[in-house]
Amino acid sequence: MKKFKSLGLITAALFTASITLTACGTGTKSASTPAPSAAATAAATAKASTAPKAEKVTITIGAYSILKDSFDVILPKFKEEWKKKTGQTVEFQESYVASGSQATAIIQGFEADIAPLSLEGDIQKIVEKGLITHDWKNNPYKGNITASIAAIGVREGNPKGIKDWTDLTKPGVEVLIPNPSTSGGAKWDINAIYGAGLKTSEAAGKKDPAFAKDYLAKVYKNIKVLDKSGADSLATFDKGVGDAIVTYENELISRIQSGKKYVEVIPQYTTTIENPVALIDKNVDKHGNREAVQAFLDYLWSPDAQKVFADKGFRSVLPEVAKQYEKNYTTPAGVFNIEYLGGWDKVNKELYGKGAIWETILAEGGSK
């Protein structure tokens, strides 16, 4: 099959067409106002809790693609709980696209009330545009609702004998990975490979960015497809394209649980993955649904919701739930986090910025 790469960028029209509406109806709307103070917000919430509630309220979710399977279970659970507690019916409007594309859509006018995304950086883009006005990381979980690690998925029997990242550089091995220009998951995947190069060089005596770049470039030469999202990349792998896919561990676990004959390969060195969520203040204030949206946000950290995430292969951010599921996971001795790479500000500048490492690798590797 001729090698190809999908480098498409989202447009407003395409995004609008991608929105999946699971229910119709709208929430109560009011004119947009300046961001309230913490005291004013608390007072407004208290007043709303005592005022008569509308029969229904709409919550619009702008999420990254991989969360859909988990939310298919979580949303009905929350609707039932909220109905019992308040008598109010919640209707969800849902959109699931690549994390970077979702953040762009929200910035460009998609009025999501809540944004569960793949990367802290995607949330921060929304903050910088003034749409999120509170400290969204001010909770015990630093704003993260799920965790995972970057792993390699291979086909039944592991016919190519893939055991680590270096095996993805062998002649004849076709690799799938999403496109980091649109997919947050792709950045985690590339961070894992680049960081493994740093770890390998460090183990040999010196932490060497040049070695890590070459390490990543060798994997890039075998990439068959750069899909726009993690979900699209997995769909391509499901069609029989490629020998190996770089993705979230939870996605492999979920696929294996559903009957796919895949094998998870955990590299010696790989990165932890943390996925954040934030309430979009400007949109919530416009829609007048803060109480329900805040309750849903809080519910995502409940044991019930965290067990759903864990059942879908994520690593829970709740210690008590993580303990219950720890036998399901293997954590390699060489696992590292984003701080090992210098934090997201440094990574976005030096690895993904204009003229930075990834862009240079693309240019040097040429189009395929």
Image (cartoon, grey):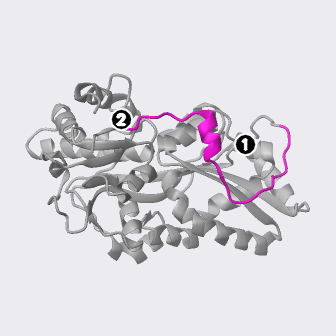
Q: Residue at x 53, y 65 (%)?
A: 70
Q: Residue at x 57, y 35 (%)?
A: 104
Please check the rendered image and state whether residue 60 is part of the magenta-colored stretch, yes or no.
Answer: no
Q: Residue at x 65, y 41 (%)?
A: 16
Amino acid carrying mark 2 in the image: Val
Q: Position of residue 365 (x, y in %)?
A: 23, 29
The total of numbered circles placed on residues is: 2
* Residue 40 in sight: no
Quarter of the image for the N terminus: give it: top left
Spot the residue most to the right.
52
Q: Position of residue 113 (x, y in %)?
A: 69, 48
| Residue under label 1 | 283
Q: Residues within 10 Å of mark 1 (few under 14, many from 20)?
A: many
| Magenta-drawn segment | 5-31
Q: Is 198 situated above or below 173?
A: above
Q: Residues within 10 Å of mark 2 (few under 14, many from 20)?
A: some
Q: Position of residue 56 (x, y in %)?
A: 83, 62
Q: Earlier in the sequence, mark 2 or mark 1?
A: 1
* Residue 279 in sight: yes
| Residue under label 2 | 347
Q: Position of residue 310 (x, y in %)?
A: 46, 69
Please check the rendered image and state whether residue 28 is part of the magenta-colored stretch, yes or no.
Answer: yes
Amino acid carrying mark 1 in the image: Asn
From the viewer's perspective, tell me whether residue 256 is left or right of residue 299.
left
